[in-house]
Amino acid sequence: QGSGQCCRTGGRRLVRRLSTADAPAAGGPVIGPGCRVLMVGGLGAVGTALAREMTGVLGARVAVIGRRPRAAAVPPDLASLVYHQADVTDAAALRGAVDAVAAELGGIDVVLHLARVVDNAPLAVKDRSRAAAVLAVKTAGTRALEAALAGREIRAFVTFSSLAAWFGLA
């Protein structure tokens, strides 16, 4: 079963497929009781579900850095979350927010990069400035986040994508 998308390169035919990855066997779970998790990108549907699971079921301590003010971003049932407002593409603001989170949580163990800009349209019809704004969150944002975390012991750094990437949207 193909995805309907393929390319030829170096005489080979490549077909895009989703697959399941096995969790590493050694070391146990990455996120558990007392784990200090930094979520960057705010609390959309995925982030909110993850925050609820990590705080309620797994017992993790969760902090969020998002663009929106706290009152607009944090649902009432997650009021205990640490929250700082910063844009992931603003390196200086992000570094300040990461430093504040690390101070409040006593460190950072796991980073989840969920930040996104929604402006769905096929790349073929999107002008450069619109495409750049969408991509900057993951490109410049990831570089800024990496720089803000420099020198810290991080067990896991997970960058989330979207089905938009699967369908050629950006």
Image: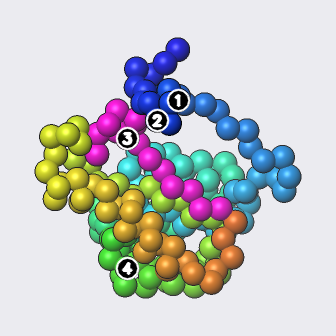
**Residue name at image x 73 percent, y 38 percent:** 22
Pointer 1 and pointer 3: residues touching (CB < 8 Å)?
A: no
**Above or below 34: residue 149:** below
The magenta segment: 156-170
Q: CA distance from mark 1 to mark 4?
A: 40 Å
The residue wearing badge 1 is 12
The amino acid at mark 1 is Arg
Which label number is shown at residue 165? Answer: 3
Q: Secondary structure at mark 1?
A: strand
Residue 153 picture quarter? bottom right
Q: Are marks 1 and 4 in contact (CB under 8 Å)?
A: no
Q: Which residue is mark 4?
A: 91
Whether residue 116 can be seen here:
yes
State if disc 3 and disc 4 touch (CB < 8 Å): no
Q: Nearer the viewer, mark 1 or mark 4?
A: 1
In the image, is 105 to the left or to the right of 159?
A: right
Separation (CA) of disc 4 from disc 3: 25 Å
Q: Is residue 50 magenta?
A: no
- Say few, some or many: other residues with alpha carbon within 10 Å of mark 1 (under 14 / 14 to 19 / 20 or more): few
